[in-house]
């Protein structure tokens, strides 16, 4: 049995401090660079689900996420362009959550300087590629979704 490369990750574990997008940020078509030309953009199709891929840029609110680590692009797999929750009036950011969030770990070796002259300074790092099935407004913690809250709702209904 082969090990899966995409892992299902609960939103509250991946981004415990939440994620935010600029109020003006929109969901964009993910470009298929192999099939697109300068004049004609072809949308990427996910190999596993055969759904169109969209991209959405967010900021991780984790106070320890710095610079490049704070800016995240999440790929959304959806037949239709996802709609965004409304931004709170007067705020430059909109809080969002992702449904069906999956992460794929990989080694980002862009900062590794091992192939040139001089001492090897490997600054490779573990990075994540994020995918989701949808974008929603954050739920209050008391109404959080997930197995624990579903069990509590089922118990209350009984």
Image (tube, rainbow, N blue to C red):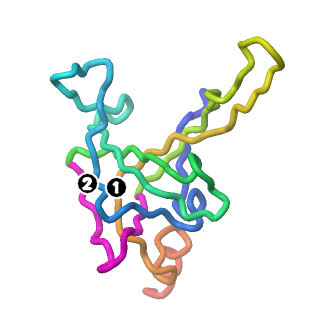
Q: What element carries label 1?
A: strand
Depicted 131 relative to depicted 153: above or below:
above
Q: Left or right of 106: which side holds 82?
A: left
Q: What stretch is highlighted in magenta?
A: 81-98
Is residue 83 on the magenta stretch? yes
**In the image as oriented, which residue stretches furthest toward the front?**
118
Depicted 10 relative to depicted 126: above or below:
below
For the residue pair 106 and 115, the one nearer the viewer reads as 115
Q: Quadrant of residue 109?
A: top right
Query: Is the residue under label 1 in contact with that under label 2 (CB below 8 Å)?
Result: yes
**In the image as oriented, which residue stretches furthest toward the left?**
39
Q: Which residue is drawn at 34% across and 55% down?
A: 134
The circle on residue 105 is none
For the residue pair 137 and 24, the one nearer the viewer reads as 24
Can you identify the residue that label 1 sits on?
A: 134
Mark 2 neighbour density, 10 Å: few (under 14) some (14–19) many (20 or more): some
Depicted 107 relative to depicted 34: above or below:
below
Q: Which of marks 2 and 1 is nearer the N terminus?
A: 2
Residue 37 percent coordinates (x, y)? 22, 19
Residue 111 percent coordinates (x, y)? 66, 30
Depicted 73 relative to depicted 125: above or below:
below
Q: Quadrant of residue 116?
A: top right
Q: Left or right of 116: which side holds 143?
A: left
Q: Rounded to the nearest whole Å, what is the CA distance between mark 2 and mark 1?
A: 7 Å
Q: Which residue is drawn at 51% across and 79% down?
A: 141
Residue 12 percent coordinates (x, y)? 56, 64
Q: Quadrant of residue 82?
A: bottom left
For the residue pair 126 and 111, the one nearer the viewer reads as 111
Q: Left or right of 61: which side holds 121?
A: right
Can you identify the residue that label 2 sits on?
A: 82
Q: Is mark 2 on a helix, strand or loop?
A: loop
């Amino acid at each position: 049995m082969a090990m899966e490369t995409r892992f299902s990750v609960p939103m509250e574990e991946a981004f415990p401090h939440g994620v935010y997008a600029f109020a003006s940020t929109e969901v964009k078509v993910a470009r298929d660079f192999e099939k697109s030309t300068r004049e004609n953009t072809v949308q990427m199709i996910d190999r596993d689900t055969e759904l169109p891929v969209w991209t959405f840029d967010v900021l991780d609110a984790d106070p320890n996420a710095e610079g490049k680590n704070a800016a995240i692009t999440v790929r959304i797999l959806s037949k239709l362009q996802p709609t965004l929750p409304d931004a709170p009036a007067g705020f430059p950011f909109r809080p969002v959550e992702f449904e069906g969030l999956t992460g794929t770990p990989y080694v980002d070796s862009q900062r590794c300087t091992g192939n040139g002259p001089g001492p090897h300074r490997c600054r490779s790092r573990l990075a994540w590629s994020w995918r989701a099935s949808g974008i929603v407004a954050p739920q209050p913690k008391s109404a959080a979704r997930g197995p624990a809250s579903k069990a509590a709702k089922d118990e209350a209904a009984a």
